[in-house]
Image: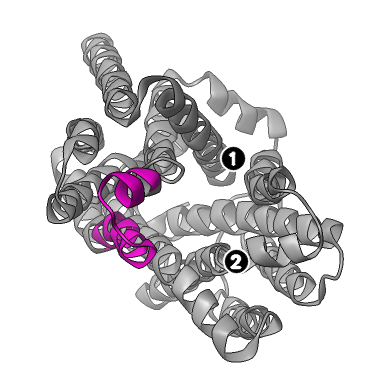
Amino acid sequence: MENQTISKQSQRNGLIVVTLAIFTDMLVYGLVVPILPGYALSLGVSQTAIGVLFGSYAIALFVATPIFGILSDKVGRKGPMLWGLLGLAGATLLYAFAKQFWMLVVARSLQGVSAAITWTAGFALLADLYPSQERGKVMGIALAGQSIGTLIGPTVGGWLYQIGGYQVPFLAATGLAIIDGLLRIFLIKNVPHEKSESVLSSLNLLKNRRLLIIVGVVIIGASIPCVLEPTLPLRLQKGMNVSSGVTGLLFAIPTLAYAISAPVIGSLSQRIGHYKAMTMGMILAAVCFPFIALSNSVWLVAIVLVFLGIGMGTAITPCLPEFAEISQKSGTNSFGASFSIYNTAYSIGMMIGPTLGGILTNYLGIVWSYSVVAIVILVYIIFFNIYNHHALKTA
């Protein structure tokens, strides 16, 4: 498919729809954070059960992503984008009226499935609409929607909960999902799409070594904030006497830095090369990690978290257009499948991060724990660049 034949209006409409879709998904993802634990406890469940509740999102995302990625290559993008919307609206309504714990688990799992559909079909739609030289910038803009949704979700959820009680945040999210759905219906029109004729051709992407080496970058980038979540708050609150409110603001810093920098990074990586940008991002993240644990000043922690957010964005943002490039060069017309691999890798990082961070901190303490994470990233950088150097010589 020739992207150049697509009108600028169609491209803009697609970018608006995908960015809002990802923003809405991550807004709802974060909206439940300050609400669900207390409500689940009121239903008489244990802390372990609450952990299972929150983990069910990543598990559902992991399972559903490859299925709907391949399906979007077969049937096109508009249908799956609408399915994802229906799943998200259903999940928010189920949250609102859940009276038993299993209903919360079903809602959280349905939310993960809808994210799998929206993310894979959404980024595949952008790859369909934009030529390769513009994908870095537009995918960076879409990722900014992710970061903004993640950033304001918990705040909006907590605020609406205080104003109107448990159901109000979810009913408001359902209203936003309806608006999002109307945009998906009316703005995504006449989008050309070359359907993949074979599921096997999509699965052949897994044999591509270039793609698999980038999968490692995605896993690292996704795990970085998840390492911090179970470990840094205790360091801040017990070791530095930082309040819960300030801790929440500190966690918002890397997300905000990511949101602001992602569109710029997308354009920059297009100019300097995606692999070079990924390497720079991983190096910056690796350098930041030990300094977070060693810092004794809240202001110093805040500054390091800014650079960590930029590092995360610089590592992950170039992965998206590179995935599309690999898919296009493979000749399989399988953007959905390629972005399903991205989503699967991201969900793996979300599962590895908190587990690794918790175990290492428990046995080694936070300084050595974060240092080990930094060493792992640096070792992967060496492997990543050796492989790329060899690939260039043999190309």
Whether 43 is among the magenta residues is no
Which amino acid is tagged 2? Answer: Val
Expressed as whole percent of the image width and height from the top left, the position of residue 169 reads: 61, 80
Image-based side of 143 in relation to 52, left or right: left
Q: At x 39% / y 32%, what residue is drawn?
A: 220
**Which residue does the numbered mark 2 point to in the structure image?**
32
- The residue segment tinted magenta is 234-259
Expressed as whole percent of the image width and height from the top left, the position of residue 186 reads: 59, 83
Q: At x 73% / y 60%, what residue is drawn?
A: 41
Whether 237 is among the magenta residues is yes
Asked which secondary structure carries label 2, the reply is: loop
Question: Which is more toward the observer, 338 or 283?
Answer: 283
| Quarter location, residue 392 | top left
**Which residue does the numbered mark 1 point to in the structure image?**
337
Q: Distance from label 1 to label 2 (Cα)?
A: 29 Å
Question: Which is more toward the observer, 267 or 110?
Answer: 110
How many other residues sit within 10 Å of disc 2, few (<14), some (14-19) or many (≥20)?
many
Q: At x 67% / y 70%, what residue is drawn?
A: 85
Asked which secondary structure carries label 1, the reply is: helix
Residue 76 in the image: above or below residue 280: below
Expressed as whole percent of the image width and height from the top left, the position of residue 359 reads: 49, 25
Which amino acid is tagged 1? Answer: Ala
Q: Counting residues from the N terminus, which is met first, the one under dot 1 or under dot 2? A: 2
